[in-house]
């Protein structure tokens, strides 16, 4: 798996403010395929990111593709956990 591209795409797809509240945990295998996993301890931020998760996933995947990642490695869902 292209781990360095995953990390770089996360850093490019988010601002420093988001990065200080949302912790990238990587791309993991889920029941439906690969998923972008984010840890968000603060409930207010978590709720907002739940509303935005489709947009986050699209932006993230677009950046992964622009960095040369093969489509087979792209996450198909965004999973948000509290801790």
Image (cartoon, rainbow, N blue to C red):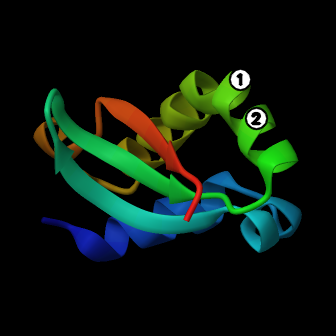
At mark 1, the secondary structure is helix
Residue 68 percent coordinates (x, y): 29, 54
Q: Which residue is mark 2?
A: 47
Left or right placement of residue 29 versus residue 24 in this view: left
Instruction: Pick the residue in front: 74 or 35.
Output: 35
- Alpha-carbon span between mark 2 and mark 1: 7 Å
Q: Nearer the viewer, residue 21 or 5?
A: 21
Residue 34 vertical placement versus 19 (above, below): above
Q: Residues within 10 Å of mark 1 (few under 14, many from 20)?
A: few
Q: Quadrant of the C terminus?
A: bottom right
For disc 2, the neighbor class at 10 Å (few under 14, some 14 to 19, many from 20) is few
In the picture, residue 33 is in which quadrant?
A: top left
Q: Number of numbered discs present? A: 2
Question: From the viewer's perspective, is residue 13 above or below residue 4?
Answer: above
**Residue ID for mark 1:** 51
Residue shown at 48% from the left, 70% from the top: 8
Q: Residue at x 49, y 59 (%)?
A: 9
Marks 1 and 2: in contact by CB < 8 Å? yes
Quadrant in which the N terminus appears: bottom left
- Name the spot of residue 66 as percent of width and height, x first: 42, 47
Camera-nearest label, 2 or 1: 2
Answer with left or right where residue 31 lies relative to residue 35: left
The image's mark for residue 35 is none
Residue at screen point 29% across, 29% down: 76
x, y (%) of residue 75? Answer: 29, 39
Using the rendered view, name the quadrant where residue 26 is placed. Answer: bottom left
* Residue 50 percent location from the top left of the image: 65, 31
């Amino acid at each position: 798996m292209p781990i360095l591209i995953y990390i770089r795409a996360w850093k490019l797809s988010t601002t420093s403010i988001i990065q200080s509240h949302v912790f990238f945990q990587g791309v993991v295998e889920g029941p439906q395929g690969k998923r972008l996993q984010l840890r968000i301890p603060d409930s207010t931020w978590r709720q907002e990111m739940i509303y935005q998760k489709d947009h986050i996933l699209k932006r993230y995947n677009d950046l992964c593709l622009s960095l040369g990642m093969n489509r087979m490695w792209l996450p198909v869902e965004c999973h948000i956990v509290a801790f």
